[in-house]
Amino acid sequence: MNSTNRAANRLFILVIGLTLLVVGAGAAATVLVPVVRDGWSDATGPVTHQVSTWLQQTALGDTGVSWIMPAVLVLLVIAVIVLVVFIARQGRGHTSVALTEPTSEHGTTVVEAAVAEHALEEAISARPEFVASHVSTYRVRRTPVLKISVTCRRGVSPRDAARIVEDAVRALDELLGRPLPALVQISGGFRSRVTATTRLQ
Amino acid sequence: MTTTLTSLDTAQDARPDSASNGSGTPVPASFTRLYRRIARRETHSPRSLLAIVLAVIVIVALAWVGTEIVIALLGAPALLVAPADMFAGTLGLVDAPVAIVATAGILVAVIGLVLVIAAVSPGRRARHLLSAERTAIVVDNEVIASALARHASLAGNVDPDNASVSVSHRHAVVHLTPTSGIPVDRAVVTEAVTRQLDSYGLRPPVSARIQIAENGRIGA
């Protein structure tokens, strides 16, 4: 329901995984495979020489310090900022507006999501089939969508739970005059396991 | 906005039977695509936790390297390893003890492989879609199992505590332990459980398998 960029999550995990795979396998191969080991030993001298040449050539003014290190530092800071933004972007997408409609030429009617949420919770929470219920509103593809999560008591048929919630949603449709898209999430969880079986039917 | 509303109304007029039980407003056709996306997202893991944990670890590592660079530029002694030593250490990999480097390398490679698998596998959650007219409904497998256990124990005339059900992606395994001396009619239980599953209209469909214990339990 939330606007988490799942492709980005998977891409990030894939990149880190591939990096670790290559680095780990490379390190193991370097010490275990004789050919790679010899190649690595031969390359050590030239690479050290090359890098120290670079560091000397890129001196920053007359301080004697190379600008490569500060440049690396800037790249690190940028990477950290990008990662922080990446973390902060997770799990967003709540909205507080259920309906926006230009009802006349002079104004717009806005129905707060709280109206729908309270109406549904009022209708559902008193039912003995449910231990707990929660209604929230998310924006999915720029459309407000209601999310109704209910926790069933032990042994309650999901069909019955679905019917109760759907009836409440239909009543809300009547109230608002137009249907809102809705997701119903029927879950069990710890609280339903410790409560007694319902004596229904 | 007005145009979309009009099109919504015509869509409703064109499909007057979209809410077959006739109560309440019919569902606009525009919801279907939305519901498909929501259903897909609700039955698969977003991999958020793993991504956040990895991102935090990478941030800490980068911050440490950055700090070492600043300290080295200031000419102060390093916190753990100076950048120059990091570079020299990487190049001098072959001179390090073989066993340690090989073990660490293989360990890191295995972690990398696990991450790659996590990134490309579907990551299904233990949930099913329930057929519905007005809303999109996802049900935890746990709830399905709990309801099946109640119906199976009623049909088989055993105590609810002696019925255990496990629901996986495509199968529901009902395990009943009969009360000693009272046989359980497998056909009746199968029929009751199958009828329940059919009434849920789960996606993907779940087929039931009934197991009845050989030995009954006394006093249950």
Image (tube, rainbow, N blue to C red):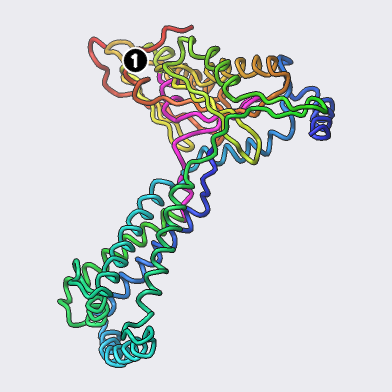
Q: Is residue A32 visible?
A: no
Q: Residue at (48%, 9%) from the top-left corner?
A: A126
Residue A194 relative to residue B43: left or right: left
The amino acid type, in three-letter code, at marker 1 is Thr
Q: Can residue B127 be found in the magenta stretch?
A: yes
- Residue B170 in the image: state x and y as whole percent: 49, 37
At x 60%, y 36%, the residue is A139
Disc 1: host chain: A
**In front here: A109 or A26?**
A109
- Quarter of the image where one finds residue A19: bottom left
Q: Quadrant of the C terminus of chain B?
A: top left
* Residue A130 lies in the magenta stretch: no
> Which corner quadrant of the image does residue B28 belong to?
top right
Q: Is residue B197 above or below residue A22?
A: above
Foreground: A84 or B169?
A: A84
Q: Please report the bounds of the magenta region as a residue range.
A: B120-149
Q: For numbered disc 1, what is the local secondary structure?
A: loop
Foreground pick, A63 / A191: A63
| Crowd rating for badge 1 (residues with CA inside 10 Å; few <14, some 14–19, many 20+) | few
Q: Which quadrant of the structure image shows residue B136? A: top right
Q: Residue at x 55, y 32 (%)?
A: B129
- Residue in the picture at 61% in, 41% down: B37
- Measuring from the top left, give residue A120's x and y in whole percent: 56, 17
Whether residue B174 can be seen here? yes
User: Which quarter of the rendering shows the N terminus of chain B?
Assistant: top right
x, y percentage for residue B156? 40, 14
**Can you give x and y, in whole percent of width and height, for residue A51 in the image?**
33, 87
Residue tagged by mark 1?
A195
